[in-house]
Image (cartoon, rainbow, N blue to C red):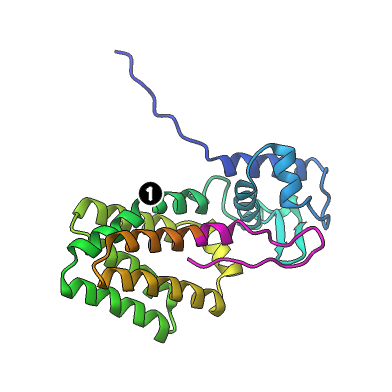
């Protein structure tokens, strides 16, 4: 009997990373050389700058490049990368922008549902997570608690499970984690906290339309900030990202 074989989906940023690493191994970009800017690479490869950003982070994880925010991306000892114990190609998980776009499809509606269906205890849990983010030393954990508390309050177990799973995928993504290492600081968390406050205020007011809009604006802001360059063509740093 004929059977269909499963086909692995190769993520675009992984394809781009492999193409750039091939050019590095071929000597087109020697050790210590500065790679073309994200804009130039995107034009050369006819892809989005977001995909280039993900590919460069993946290459850094693998030891091919050194990312210097505000300066550029520089080639390291490419031939030593595999021997140095860096993760093998393809082990870097789902890309940050795919994860954020998926969250944008689900979490705004989830916030609107929470405004309609959340119990007083569930809304209190959202508020507690929000306050914990402003007071605690682990804002990332409270950030996740805030979003998962909204999901738990939406009144639909399947939607809540979907949000939880997206966060699990985010936590498991080395590329996402590496972006956070570069771009998430106390000022960025302050921006995220202010955005969370608008979401919380709308949910407490039982205003589903405003809650949806506030969540959408929050996620869109993250997406836009993550798409900023490591540095512009003159080497000046750009502003960065919150979750």
Q: Which residue is drawn at 60% across and 50% down?
A: 50
Q: Residue 201: tell me if it is visible.
A: yes
Residue 243 lies, with reference to residue 53, above or below; the image says below
**Is 197 situated left or right of 62 in this image?**
left
Residue 85 location (% of width, % of height): 61, 57
| Placement of the N terminus among the 4 image quadrants | top left
* Residue 194 on the magenta segment: no
Report the magenta residues as a range.
Answer: 221-243
Query: Toward the viewer: 12 or 128?
Result: 128
* Residue 233 on the magenta segment: yes
Which residue is most to the bottom? Answer: 135
Structural crowding at the residue carrying mark 1, measured as other residues with C-alpha within 10 Å and reported as few (<14), some (14–19) or many (≥20): few
Helix, strand or loop for disc 1: helix
The rendered magenta stretch, by its main secondary structure, is classed as: loop
Query: Toward the viewer: 199 or 133?
Result: 199
**Is 183 situated left or right of 1 in this image?**
right
Residue 232 location (% of width, % of height): 75, 60
Q: Residue at x 17, y 75 (%)?
A: 121
- For mark 1, what is the residue? 105
Q: Quadrant of residue 202?
A: bottom left
Residue 240 location (% of width, % of height): 61, 66
């Amino acid at each position: 009997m004929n059977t269909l074989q499963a086909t692995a989906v190769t993520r675009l940023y992984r394809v781009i990373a492999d193409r750039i690493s091939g050019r590095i191994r071929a000597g087109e970009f020697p050790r210590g050389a500065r790679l073309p800017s994200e804009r130039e690479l995107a034009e050369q490869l006819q892809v989005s700058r977001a995909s280039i950003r993900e590919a460069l982070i993946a290459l850094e994880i693998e030891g091919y490049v050194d990312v210097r925010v505000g300066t550029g991306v520089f080639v390291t000892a490419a031939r030593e990368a595999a021997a140095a114990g860096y993760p093998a190609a393809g082990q870097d998980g789902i890309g940050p922008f795919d994860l954020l776009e998926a969250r944008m499809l689900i979490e705004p509606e989830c916030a609107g549902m929470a405004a309609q269906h959340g119990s007083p205890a569930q809304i209190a849990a959202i508020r507690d997570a929000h306050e914990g983010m402003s007071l605690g030393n682990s804002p990332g954990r409270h950030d996740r608690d805030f979003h998962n508390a909204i999901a738990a309050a939406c009144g639909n177990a399947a939607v809540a499970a979907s949000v939880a799973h997206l966060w699990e995928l985010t936590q498991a993504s080395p590329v996402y984690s590496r972006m956070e290492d570069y771009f998430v600081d106390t000022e960025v968390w302050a921006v995220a906290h202010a955005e969370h406050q608008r979401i919380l205020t709308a949910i407490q007011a039982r205003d589903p339309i405003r809650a949806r809009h506030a969540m959408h604006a929050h996620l869109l802001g993250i997406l836009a900030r993550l798409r900023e360059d490591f540095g512009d063509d003159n080497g000046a740093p750009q502003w960065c990202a919150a979750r």
